[in-house]
Structure formats: structure tokens, C-alpha cells
Image (tube, helix red, strand yellow):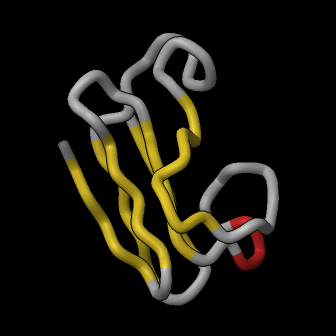
Amino acid sequence: MAVTCGQDFTAVVMEKGDLWAFGTDEDGRLGLGTDEDKRLPALVGGADEVFDGEAVVMVAAGGGAHSGSGD
């Protein structure tokens, strides 16, 4: 599992490579395709659904509205 915290949001990569995020979704920073804030973790994408079967292995946040993930 990997966790990163940005300004007012958090992203978590689970052991199987699914990416979850919660917090303030200003400017789409959670990666959910909306700007709706989430108080509970929301699935950004599963390895099989969004990332062409590749598991996310790391996640990073920086500054106010920046986040990224990689395989």
C-alpha cells in the first residue's frame, strides 16, 4: 500500500494496484472526472478497468492541485 497527501486531499494505492482518493476535488485533483469533494475514499480506478491491466505501484502529490500515479 502507498499513501500520499496533498493540500486537502489524500490518495492511496492498495496492494492489488487499485487507486483510491478522497478530500477536496477542486480542479479535478482526485482524478474522478468531477469536482465533487469526497469525505470517504472513492475508487479512481482499478488496475483492470483504467490502467490497461497494469497495477499502480506508486502515487505522489505535490503543491495544491497536483497528483500523479505510475506503474
Closer-to-camera residue (48/69): 48
Q: Residue at x 60, y 61 (%)?
A: 30
Q: Residue at x 49, y 11 (%)?
A: 53
Q: Residue at x 72, y 78 (%)?
A: 26
Q: Is residue 48 left or right of residue 54?
A: right
Examine the rendered structure and indicate whether residue 43 appears above or below residue 29.
above
Closer-to-camera residue (71/28): 28
Q: Is residue 31 left or right of residue 22?
A: right
Q: If the image is split into quadrants, where does the N terminus sit?
A: top left
Q: Is residue 3 left or right of residue 27?
A: left
Q: If the image is split into quadrants, where does the C terminus sit?
A: top left
Examine the rendered structure and indicate whether residue 45 appears above or below residue 4.
above
Question: In the orientation shown, which residue stands out farthest toward the front?
Answer: 39
Examine the rendered structure and indicate whether residue 11 appears above or below residue 63.
above
Q: Is residue 57 left or right of residue 33?
A: left
Percent position of residue 4, x then y: 31, 66
Q: Residue at x 41, y 58 (%)?
A: 11
Question: In the orientation shown, which residue stands out farthest toward the right?
Answer: 34
Closer-to-camera residue (37/67): 37
Percent position of residue 36, x then y: 76, 66
Percent position of residue 69, x then y: 45, 48
